[in-house]
Image: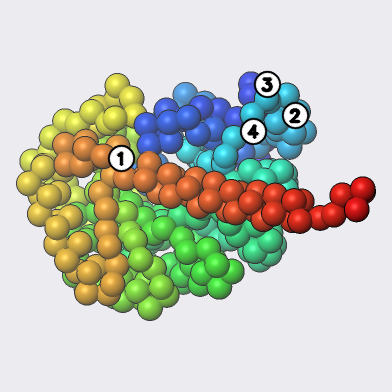
Amino acid sequence: MKVLLKERKSSVLSPSTLKCLNGTPTINPTAGCAHLCSYCYARGYSNYPGDGTIVLYANLVEKLESELNRKRKTPGFVYFSPSCDAFQPVKQVLDTTYSLMALLLEKGIGVSFLTKGRIPDRFIALFKLHSNNVNAHVGITTLNRQLQKQIEPHAATPGIRLKNIRALTQIGILPEIRFDPLMPGLTDSTGNLGSLLKILGRSGIKRVGLNYLFLRPIINKNIREGLRHTKAMEKISQAFCDNVDLQLLASKSRVKALNLDFRQKQYKYISLLAKQYGIKTYVCGYKNPDIAEDLTCNSIWQKYFDKKTLQYQLFSNQHSEITISQPSNHD
């Protein structure tokens, strides 16, 4: 993997175009991602440096600290990363990500992330010190290493992602799990999801987000190249024969989605399957605006804020009581 160093000229903290992250600043440590997932829409962005290359913004830490010092009001938390994975298997990227997260957490600003990479031990140690300010999401759709490697060639193995989940739960951070994207006839079978849900249930996981694969031109191209001449590609092509045009809530862009009846039926089926293992599922309206009206991710962020606010209020009340009970200098 070729790493190009570049100075960031624009702001480090960027507003998200995703409505479920409305008002939440985001950070992308890199342009491009080493994982090269076949379904990644960011591989079609205008600033994408090409497969096999990532651009790392070398001045992010200093620039972020400067931005935070100038702000009148610091954000409640920052999301990593809408266009790349914060935990790419590249030392320079991990070093930068660690410094960014440490800076935020030490200032009392929460960090949230969705990853399909390996979370190194030093991050787990950092998160343990700030467990109330870490909101973790782990993406996983199969335990089958061979299948996972076909669709996510350089992402962490299923075994490593399960290790991430165990490590997070052991320090008091219960991660949200994302079955995203589910691939029709490939990762949505009873055999595939049943074994995965069983392990997740035993790990204490309570919620799983669901979303089926949608196609943009770049995703269609990359999936066909990655799965060419395989039965998997045949199943996906067959499922999309009856596709529908869908406009995502995040932008004006349109995508090819699996038809409404198929998704509704499958989401209900997976929900019932998950219930057997004590797991609730949700379908976010961002990627399924024709099914779910609410943006479920918003409720997740809100719970995070509510928890943080309650903790602050409790601390403030305790502090006030201590201050009042202390004797004055005149006693």
Alpha carbon separation for disc pair 3 and 2? 17 Å
Q: Which residue type carries mark 3?
A: Lys
Judge whether residue 80 can be spotted in this image.
no
Tag 4 residue: 74
Whichever of callouts 3 and 2 sits on the residue coming sooner in the sequence is: 3
- Residue behind mark 3: 9
Q: Position of residue 280 (x, y in %)?
A: 27, 62
* Label 3, label 4: how far apart the Cα atoms are: 21 Å
Q: Residue at x 7, y 46 (%)?
A: 261
Binning the other alpha carbons within 10 Å of mark 4 as few (below 14), some (14 to 19) or many (20 upward) gives some
Quadrant of the image occupied by residue 139: bottom left
Q: Nearer the viewer, mark 3 or mark 2?
A: 2
Q: Residues within 10 Å of mark 3 (few under 14, many from 20)?
A: few
Q: In the shown orientation, is residue 252 left or right of residue 330?
A: left
Determine the CA span between mark 4 and mark 1. Answer: 24 Å
Viewer can see residue 103: yes
Give amino acid for label 4: Thr
Image coordinates of residue 79 in percent, x first then y, are: 53, 41
For label 1, the residue is 295
Q: Residue at x 59, y 69 (%)?
A: 171
Where does label 2 land, which residue? 69
Q: Residue at x 81, y 55 (%)?
A: 326
Sequence-wise, the earlier of marks 1 and 3 is: 3
Looking at the rendered image, the disc whose residue lies closer to the viewer, 1 or 3, is 1
Nearest to N terminus: mark 4 or mark 1? 4
